[in-house]
Image (cartoon, helix red, strand yellow):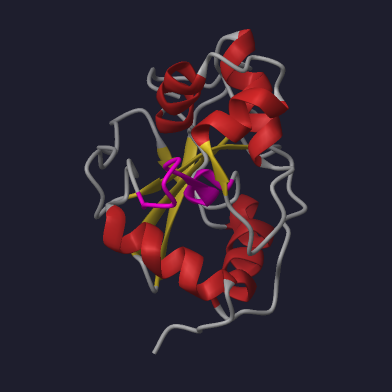
């Protein structure tokens, strides 16, 4: 979604959503979600001139995110289209298998995908996750249990993990 069209050649569609972790930018093609970015994070995405603002295709995503932030949803049921290399796509699928409220270290996740010596590569691929929150990269922590490396900032990562522990946002 970095270019002017989606992988299907369609004009990229977008909308925004105010959330307890700040403004979220949702990108898609009307059929699938291609990106979810935390605009208050380290790497906000600039709206491009060829993109079309259109809320309707994101109705389900917005509703599911609102339910998640209200503590009423533990899994998402959305069509996702994630562009990446084979290793990244395999890792992003594995992220979706980490149960709500649980965490794994980068090393544990590397072992889960059959690459036990690839913890550093797991970290890099995790940072490239184009669909934050829904593809729960926030559930990956350091080997010591410390919160490390999150595009939305460590305070946001801590808030999301607190939400999943049942400590709803104030």
Question: Which of 4/18 is in front?
Answer: 18
Place of residue 135 in the rendered image (x, y in percent of width and height, measured from the top left):
60, 44
Quadrant of the drawing holding the C terminus: bottom left
Expressed as whole percent of the image width and height from the top left, the position of residue 76 reads: 72, 56
In which quadrant of the rendered view does residue 31 lie? top right
Q: Is residue 46 left or right of residue 13?
A: left
Residue farthest to the right, as pictured = 77
The image shows residue 168, relative to residue 126, as above or below, that is: below
Which residue is at a point 40% across and 22% down the rendered structure image? 124
Residue 144 in the magenta stretch? The answer is: yes
The percent position of residue 111, horizontal first and vertical second, equals 66, 24
Residue 127: name its quadrant. top left
Q: How many marks?
A: 0
Q: Which residue is rendered at x = 43% and y = 83% of the image?
A: 169
Between 59 and 151, which is closer to the camera in this rendering?
A: 151
Residue 17 position within the rendered picture, expressed as x and y whole percent measured from the top left: 43, 63
Examine the rendering and report whether any part of residue 9 can be seen.
no
Quick one: 124 or 15, which is closer to the camera?
A: 124
Residue 2 is covered by the magenta coloring: no
Q: Which residues are magenta?
A: 136-147
Q: Quadrant of residue 8?
A: top right
Q: Is residue 133 above or below residue 164?
A: above
Q: Is residue 154 visible?
A: yes
Is 154 located above or below residue 8 in the figure? below
Instruction: Quarter of the image for the N terminus: give it.
Output: top left
Going 74% across and 43% down the picture, which residue do you hit? Answer: 97
- Farthest front residue? 144
């Amino acid at each position: 979604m970095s270019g002017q069209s989606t992988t299907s050649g369609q004009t990229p569609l977008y909308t925004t959503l105010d959330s307890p972790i700040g403004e979220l930018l949702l990108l898609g093609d009307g059929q699938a979600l291609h990106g979810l970015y935390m605009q208050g994070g380290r790497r906000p995405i600039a709206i491009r001139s060829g993109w079309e603002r259109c809320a309707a295709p994101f109705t389900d995503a917005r509703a599911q995110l609102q339910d998640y932030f209200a503590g009423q949803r533990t899994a998402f049921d959305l069509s996702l289209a994630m562009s990446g290399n084979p290793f990244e796509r395999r890792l992003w699928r594995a992220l979706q298998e980490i149960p709500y409220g649980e965490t794994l270290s980068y090393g544990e996740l590397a072992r889960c995908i059959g690459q036990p010596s690839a913890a550093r590569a797991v970290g890099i691929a995790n940072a490239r996750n184009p669909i934050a929150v829904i593809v729960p990269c926030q559930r990956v922590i350091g080997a010591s249990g410390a919160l490390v490396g999150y595009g939305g900032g460590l305070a946001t990562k801590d808030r999301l993990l607190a939400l999943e522990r049942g400590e709803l946002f104030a």
